[in-house]
Amino acid sequence: MFDAPSWAERLGGDTFLAQSYFRSHLVVRGKPDDFADLISWTTPNQVIATHRLEPPRLRLSQGGEMVPLRRYAVPVTTRRATVWHRIQPAELHARIREGASLVVDSIDEIHGPTTAAAEGLERFLRTPVQANAYASWTATEGFGTHWDDHDVVVCQAEGAKRWRIYGPTRPAPTWRDTDTPQVPDGEPLADIVLNPGDTLYLPRGWWHAVTADQGAPSLHLTFGLTTQTGADFMTWVIDQLRDDVRFRTDVPRFDTPTAQPRARLDQHPETGERTLAAAGTAWDFAAPAGPLLTRLATGRPATLGELAQQAGLPVADTAALLTVLVQGQAAAVSGAGR
């Protein structure tokens, strides 16, 4: 039984929390029968035979892509007019022989020993955990080189799996992010083989490629650790704001100009400089640009000549200022003649 003390002992307790957790990968070698009571080859057969698993709960993956469902399941309509997909054993085995890997998501919800192990890991690391089962019979990569948006603890139960680990290319990436991590180049920083009883910890964002290329079928469990970030906390705060009618009310699109969320133009009394805030960016301009910016802030269209004349600036200087604002998406050029 993998309770919290067992996980702490296996991963290294306080040393793991202080040196590896969130920081670097960790390999813990074990004995071949360490996970014998947790999962075996009979487990996937029992789960598939006794549960109605809809994709992506149960899925096949090959070469980094999902195998189309129609290639191993058929739709079935029940008496109540609901549709589910019945696995076709012969087609499933054919796809596996062709190199597909089998995945059962959230196996902890339907398999008692895995449930207990996931709960023990939750108590140790104080975060929700989801366990997936992965089975591979050939050396074909199921998922290609990729990264996960959550930390994982991998338990190799049967056979062997090769893990090529490249490390992160973006610190702490998330599934909903402002940028995409760059694919790593060069050689992996670690090239390891997990055998039965071995455990691997991998922080989120660490690129890896996994293959069952050791000459034997592989079965392992991956315990995914739910992330708890500052952005998640702010999302929770925003959800709480929905209790307040002021935050549920529409933005006043047709209110007076001063009440609408337009560009903001501020003047600094000491220097006369102007700050224009729009499109999520702020620009500082010298005092002579004030009349031009005031006109732009109204939102009314104007020609380059009109703006230069109103500001008392050369046309070239006016064009340079407008170029900055257009590139920053605070102003737009219209093709309509006047």
Image (tube, rainbow, N blue to C red):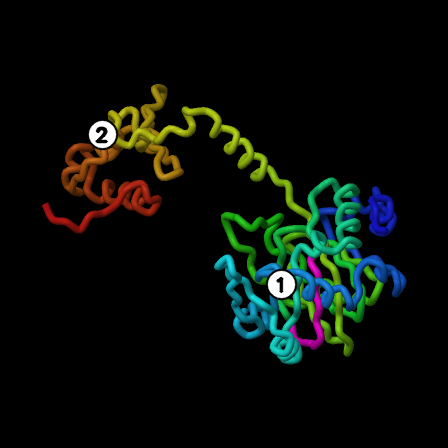
Q: Secondary structure at mark 1?
A: strand
> Of marks 2 and 1, which one's residue comes earlier in the chain?
1
Q: Determine the residue positioned at 23% across, 40% down.
A: 318
Q: Does residue 202 appear in the picture of this structure?
A: no
Residue lying furthest front in this view? 79
Magenta range: 132-141
Q: Quadrant of the C terminus?
A: top left
Q: Name which quarter of the figure residue 161 lies in.
A: bottom right
Q: Name which quarter of the figure residue 229 lies in.
A: top right
Q: Determine the residue positioned at 24% across, 44% down.
A: 319
Q: Report crowding for label 1: few under 14, some 14 to 19, many 20 or more residues within 10 A (C-alpha).
A: some
Would you name the residue on which mark 1 appears? 58
Rendered view: 60 above or below 11: below
Rendered view: 293 above or below 135: above
Would you name the residue on which mark 2 appears? 291
Tell me residue 328's x, y (percent). 35, 44
Rendered view: 215 above or below 80: below
Residue 272 part of the magenta-drawn span? no
For residue 220, side relative to residue 145 (left or right): right
Rendered view: 153 above or below 227: below
Q: Amino acid at mark 1?
A: Leu
Q: Does residue 113 appear in the picture of this structure?
A: yes
